[in-house]
Image (cartoon, rainbow, N blue to C red):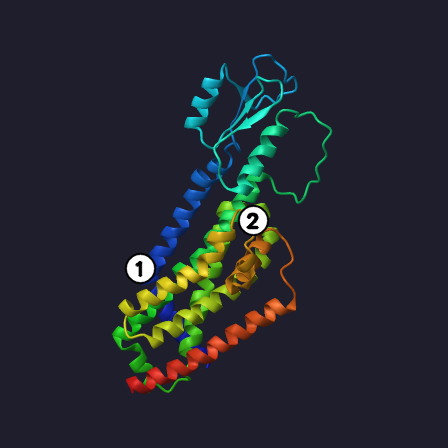
């Protein structure tokens, strides 16, 4: 059994290295790293909001150096017209009046609090420091988690379909139908190659974008969550590929599944706002499991892992059933 599995695994490795999927993975790794280090981090390092103050009588005496003073109301209106995210403070009457373009309720409340805090920066305030991540490190971990989740759930899912459709076209499944091998070795070999490639991708992506020192401490938890997500998506991809006739039919299913799987990232990433219904989305908990791993936060209890294991086991049984049916057709 092990000898046959190793033979299949070597064959799958050669096909992956010689195919476009390997080059695509390397390309995405380079693209993600450039984006994080030269785009995202610099963007997140920008200031929150620009705050402008019109105070002709000088009534505000404890103003932060971050506040930009203007010479007239007209100048305040003009600058806010260009900087619609900025906040203006009109203190010409002695009582500060906030002026800004309306946005969402939560964002507006945050802008108001931030602007008012700059009028009294030396007030008697105390803050509790939570965690040891700097703002930049927090941003790096968040975006790396999101990119890894997307890579496995969307790109990797597409990759396994491309490889299997290529093998179907080459008659590989037809050959397996007549070979004296255990049929589940074909499935296990595919799972092993994509699992190892996803784990390697996770290691490299984390090291290049989070840093070596932090990677060492969080890597075991990150790899565990990566392995669970990789197996889940690989089995889902195998099931869809075996059920559908060609890659054209798979494309529609892929778009629907990719949108559904990625929804938690688009709706809950990099924000403290949590939609009431998002907790019912199964992939929200999977995404949060990976995010918690990056921040060293304990993941949900045994129920989380039991549910994950049950879903993977059910998918494996489904793949075996569909594969046996496909072999019957080819035979």
Q: Is residue 299 visible?
A: yes
- Please give the residue where the numbered disc 2 appears in the rendered image: 273
Residue 298 is drawn in which quadrant? bottom right
Q: Secondary structure at mark 2?
A: loop
Residue 224 is drawn in which quadrant? bottom right
Q: Residue at x 54, y 47 (%)?
A: 271
Label annotation for residue 20: 1
Residue 319 is drawn in which quadrant? bottom left
Q: Residue at x 54, y 54 (%)?
A: 275
Q: Is residue 68 above or below residue 203?
A: above
Q: Position of residue 63 (x, y in %)?
A: 62, 21
Q: Position of residue 289 (x, y in %)?
A: 57, 59
For the residues labelled 1 and 2, the Cα–Cα distance comes to: 39 Å
Q: Tell us which disc is closer to us: 1 or 2.
A: 2
Query: Mark 1–mark 2 contact, CB under 8 Å?
Result: no
Residue at the limit of the structure toward the front, as seen here: 93
Label annotation for residue 236: none
Q: Residue at x 45, y 75 (%)?
A: 188
Q: Is residue 308 above or below residue 262?
A: below
Q: Secondary structure at mark 1?
A: helix
Q: Position of residue 229 (x, y in %)?
A: 50, 64
Q: Position of residue 314 (x, y in %)?
A: 50, 77
Q: Quadrant of the C terminus?
A: bottom left
- Label 2 crowding class (10 Å Cα cut-off): few <14, some 14-19, many 20+? few
Residue 17 placement, left or right of 268: left
- Tally of numbered discs: 2
Q: Is residue 125 above or below residue 34?
A: above
Residue 282 placement, left or right of 319: right
Q: Is residue 15 visible?
A: no
Which residue is more in the foreground, 70 or 140?
A: 70
Nearer-N-terminus badge (1/2): 1
């Amino acid at each position: 059994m092990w000898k046959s599995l190793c033979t299949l695994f070597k064959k799958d490795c050669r096909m992956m290295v010689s195919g476009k999927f390997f080059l695509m993975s390397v390309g995405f790794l380079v693209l993600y790293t450039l984006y994080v280090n030269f785009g995202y981090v610099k963007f997140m390092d920008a200031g929150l909001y620009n705050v402008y103050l019109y105070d002709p009588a000088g009534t505000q005496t404890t103003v932060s150096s971050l506040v930009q003073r203007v010479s007239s109301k007209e100048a305040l209106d003009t600058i806010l017209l260009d900087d619609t995210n900025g906040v203006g403070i009109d203190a010409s009457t002695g009582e500060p009046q906030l002026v800004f373009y309306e946005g969402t309720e939560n964002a507006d409340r945050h802008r108001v609090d931030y602007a008012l805090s700059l009028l009294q920066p030396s007030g008697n305030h105390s803050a509790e420091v939570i965690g040891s991540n700097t703002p930049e490190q927090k941003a790096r971990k968040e975006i790396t988690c999101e990119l890894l989740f997307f890579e496995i759930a969307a790109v990797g899912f597409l990759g396994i379909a491309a490889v299997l459709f290529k093998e179907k076209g080459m008659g590989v499944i037809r050959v397996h139908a007549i070979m004296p091998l255990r049929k589940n070795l074909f499935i296990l070999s595919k799972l092993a190659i994509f699992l190892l490639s996803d784990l390697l991708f996770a290691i490299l992506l984390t090291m290049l974008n989070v840093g070596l020192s932090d990677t060492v401490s969080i890597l075991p938890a990150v790899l565990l969550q990566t392995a669970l997500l990789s197996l889940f998506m690989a089995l889902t991809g195998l099931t869809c590929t075996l059920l559908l006739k060609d890659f054209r039919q798979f494309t529609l299913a892929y778009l629907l599944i990719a949108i559904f799987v990625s929804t938690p990232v688009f709706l809950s990433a990099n924000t403290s706002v949590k939609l009431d219904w998002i907790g019912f989305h199964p992939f929200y908990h999977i995404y949060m499991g990976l995010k918690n791993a990056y921040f060293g936060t304990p993941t949900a209890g045994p129920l989380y892992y039991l549910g994950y294991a049950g879903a993977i086991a059910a998918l494996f049984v489904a793949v075996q059933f569909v594969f046996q049916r496909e072999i019957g057709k080819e035979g």
